[in-house]
Amino acid sequence: MLDMQDISRVYRTDLVETHALRGLNLSVDAGEFVAVTGPSGSGKTTFLNIAGLLESATDGRYLLDGVDVNTLNDNQRSRIRNEKIGFIFQSFNLIPDLNIFDNVDVPLRYRGFGGKERRQRIEKALEQVGLAARMKHLPSQLSGGQQQRAAIARALAGNPGFLLADEPTGNLDSLMARQVMDLLEEINANGTTIVMVTHDPELARRAHRNVQLLDGQLASPDLFARPAAADDVDLQPVA
Amino acid sequence: MFFYNLRLARMSLMKQPGLTALMVAAIGIGVGACMTIVTYVYALSSDPIPDKSEELFAVRLDSWNPDEPYWDNKPEEAPEQLTHRDAMALLESTIPTRHAAMRKAVYTVVPDSEDVAPFLNIARMTGRDFFEMFQVPFLYGGSWDESADANAESVVVLGRETNEKLFGDTNSVGETVLLGTERFTVVGVIDAWQPAVLFYDMNNGETNPVEDIFVPFTISDRREIAGAGNTNCWKDEQIDTYWDLLQSECVIVQFWAELETPQQKAEYQAWLDNYTEGQKALGRFERPTNNRLSTVTEWMKVNDVASNEVLVVMWVGFLFLAACLVNTIGLILARFIAKAPVIGLRRALGASKGAIFRQHLLEVALVGVVGGALGLVLSRLGVMGVRRMLSDADRLTGMNLDLLFMTFGIAVLSAILAGLYPTWRVCQMAPAGYLKTQ
């Protein structure tokens, strides 16, 4: 699914050269749930941006579904982002002026689906996250957990094979965080590959595999067994 | 996607109404000022009689001073008017389909009703061909007949306004009206008619209103009416009486001929040249032969109707529009940069640079459309202001359909031009940089 070899990312100004990633090697198989942890400044977000084709690596090779993304132009990268990748952000990143239905609609518009198909996909995705009854609400009328679930619905509506989550529970209280994690696990169980950046070791343990970044390099390629306790957590739709 | 983008544009503009109003105002004021000037220049420079302008010719003979040309800045041109005797001689030619000599005059109109006070009115002494030659529309009646021209009969064609003043909104044909001390019989009333430029007599003010009284040219001789137009003389002559003036070398008569074919024009040109050769033999026309037949549009150019000064003012108008656009660029840039997080998000969710570009260009085009509507209102007010400031520009008719589309076109184009750089800038934004800050 995702294969990064010797990925480097250098930010340059006139005075400073910052190495955010230094020869990172990482492979993620289809269907995996990988947690990426590490201290602030370790390169987690840069890794996620490169993985999501939001930035390009300065050096190295990145294959996504067997395609060398370095050879793609901007339009092709946009299309892959739209069709293959779903994004979940820490601060939800819903568009405040659009209701939940229209927020979920955004990537589908750029995909070029017709009105009927878009409606079906949006309704299905919102049902999946338990927000079907709130599709006409503005983001500001929802709780943080609901907003994150709306963002997850937006990521899911296009049926991406690959979900990138950047601190998806970072702005949520523990109950809501648990519900969001349950949802991500359910999505993963349905076959979607997930790479999640997190600070929280508890959340990281619920992934199939935890990789740790330190100074832009892989510090610990340890494999964690998925804790059995995680399966016990039920999805609790929030009213 | 167009309607989706249109909806996004509307929402975006409504979100910050103050900033939107400023952008619309900048475009609207710029376009309004610019189009006011363009409308004025357009009215002055457009063909006032497009159906016939290539068949109507201002006739001029160079009978001027042999030592210096009539026009200082255009020495190759003949005087703009003819002497009375030359005009009368030209009326003898049978080559033109129609022709008319004419002079401006002033009459005192004495209403029969005691309720209406006598008033002065500008008049035109001309021939019957004037009306058909210049496609003058009649509300009632028509032109006088040939015998009226030949016998200097006391007949009059009234303008609509004078007719309403004297007779109300009725057909006054057959009624009489006292002009000065003589009674004239009304033979026709012309309908509303106001060429953008008074092309048939630019010598006496190209933006003057059309006269409201028309009488036969030959009346001037019978009544010894000196006329109220320009009288230009060069020769040291004793002019004590009206008849002295008619026999002098003073140019006082405008002359027009209708020549429908090039052959007819060539024949008439030869006739004029023969005439002046004959006059040279009598000691007149001492300058090189220079008989001119100018079409309506050529005649307007000779008279500098849309002069360089006016064109300079038009460019100043466009410069003002450019200044407004620079302001608009700043406002649009500020607005788009404030939207950077949402733009970054849309890029992350799969919008290409092209999709973002189209979305935002449509938004600025929408500003252009609203700005165009405002510009239209402002230019309308501007034209009214010009009419007030220039009392002789009453007949600027405002905008036709071409100018209306032009206003909208300029507004939308201006907005798009102003929006190109900001739109390009937002398309270059790296989406990742804004996703954390949303």
Image (tube, grey):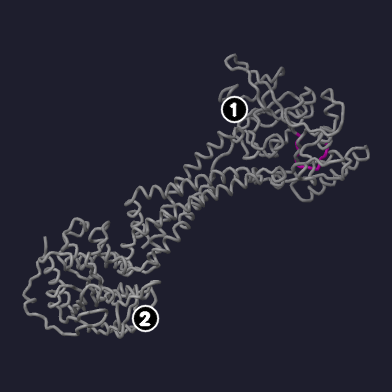
Confirm or deny contact between disc 2 and disc 1 (CB under 8 A): no
Above or below, B109 against A55 in this view is above
Question: Which disc number belongs to residue A70?
Answer: 2
A168 sits left or right of B368 in the view? left
Q: Amino acid at mark 2?
A: Asn
Residue receiving disc 1: B161
Q: Secondary structure at mark 2?
A: helix
* Region rendered in magenta: B92-101
Q: Quadrant of residue A55?
A: bottom left
Question: Which disc number belongs to residue A26?
Answer: none
Give the mark toward the camera: 2 or 1.
Answer: 2
- Magenta span: helix, strand or loop, mainly? loop
Q: Chain of mark 2?
A: A
- B397 within the magenta span: no
Q: Is residue B224 visible?
A: yes
Q: Quadrant of residue A131?
A: bottom left
- Real-space Cα distance between discs 2 and 1? 80 Å
Q: Amino acid at mark 1?
A: Glu
